[in-house]
Image (spheres, rainbow, N blue to C red):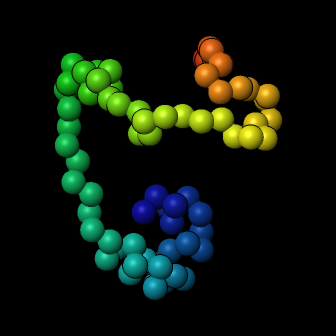
Amino acid sequence: MGAAKRFPGLDKATFPKVWHLIESLPKPKYETLDTEAALKTVKEAKLSSPSISVLKDEPLGLEQDASVVVDSAE
């Protein structure tokens, strides 16, 4: 694990139970998508919720169904 190399004291000898827990977790199975398939997947994705609501005490004072524009900070 990279953190143990960068930060002394996080090695396996210092935290054997944590390392054992991490090593016992199942390894993720990655599926690689080509660029076009990835773009298609993102563009055709649905919202995780069928409706989006605004909190009653929304700090910016946004109202339900207000039009919002999001710009990149870059």
Quadrant where the N terminus sits is bottom left
Between residue 21 and residue 69, name the one nearer to us: 69
Image quadrant assignment for residue 24: bottom left
Between residue 38 and residue 20, name the one nearer to us: 38
Left or right placement of residue 32 versus residue 2 in this view: left
Left or right placement of residue 2 versus residue 69 in this view: left
Do we see residue 48 in this rendering?
yes
Residue at (49% x, 34% y) in the render: 51
User: Does 46 appear above or below 73?
Assistant: below
Residue at (27% x, 68% y) in the render: 26
User: Does 73 appear above or below 17?
Assistant: above
Residue 65 picture location, percent across and down: 61, 22
Residue 18 picture location, percent across and down: 47, 79
Quadrant where the C terminus sits is top right
Residue 5 picture location, percent across and down: 50, 62
Residue 9 picture location, percent across and down: 59, 74
Do we see residue 35 in this rendering?
no
Image quadrant assignment for residue 52: top right
Residue at (79% x, 28% y) in the render: 61
User: Does 6 appear above or below 39?
Assistant: below
Residue at (38% x, 81% y) in the render: 20
